[in-house]
Amino acid sequence: MHARSGDKGGDANLGVWVRDFQAWEWLRSTLTVDELRRLLPETRELAIARYELPNLGAINFLIRGLLGTGATSITAAGRAGQSTRRMAARTQHQSTEISLSQESHR
């Protein structure tokens, strides 16, 4: 699984993608808006749009207002970087647990 983030003003984009169909089905069914809110509690009160890009094996989230006044604000940029790293680490940990769980059922 791979992730990339970006910003436009106070809004943040978070793209997450995988490289094979089995992983895509897992990503598509697991990484919902509710799961993103669980992984990034600071998004709890924010508007989030989720876009599936199945031909790319990707999901893109548009998180409105995550960066406050914009990424050029030092505290907002720090918050954005921390949020993205936190989400990637939590999701990677979760996918490892799922992968290990699947291996034990074979």
Image (cartoon, rainbow, N blue to C red):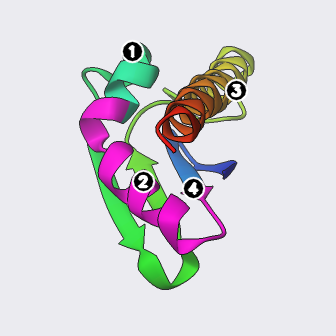
User: Callout 3, which amino acid?
Assistant: Arg
The local secondary structure at tag 2 comes to: helix
In primary-sequence order, the first of circles 1 and 4 is 4
Q: Residue drawn at (33%, 32%), measured in percent from left and top?
A: 35
* Distance from Cα at disc 1 to Cα at disc 4: 18 Å
The magenta segment: 16-35
Is 34 placed above or below 38 here? below
Q: Is residue 73 above or below residue 53?
A: above
**Would you say the residues marked 2 and 4 are in contact, meaning their CB atoms lie under 8 Å apart?**
no
Residue assigned mark 1: 41
- For numbered disc 3, what is the local secondary structure? helix
Considering only order in the chain, which callout, 4 or 3, is on the residue closer to the N terminus? 4
- Identify which residue, 46 or 22, lies in the foreground: 22
Q: Mark 3 or 1 closer to N-term?
A: 1
Q: Amino acid at mark 1?
A: Pro
Q: Which mark is residue 85?
A: 3
SS label for mark 1: helix
**Residue marked by disc 2:** 26
Disc 3 to disc 1, C-alpha distance: 13 Å
Q: Name the foreground residue: 35 vs 25.
A: 25
Residue highlighted by disc 4: 15
**Of the numbered discs in the image, which one, if any, rests on residue 80?**
none
Q: Position of residue 19 (x, y in %)?
A: 66, 69
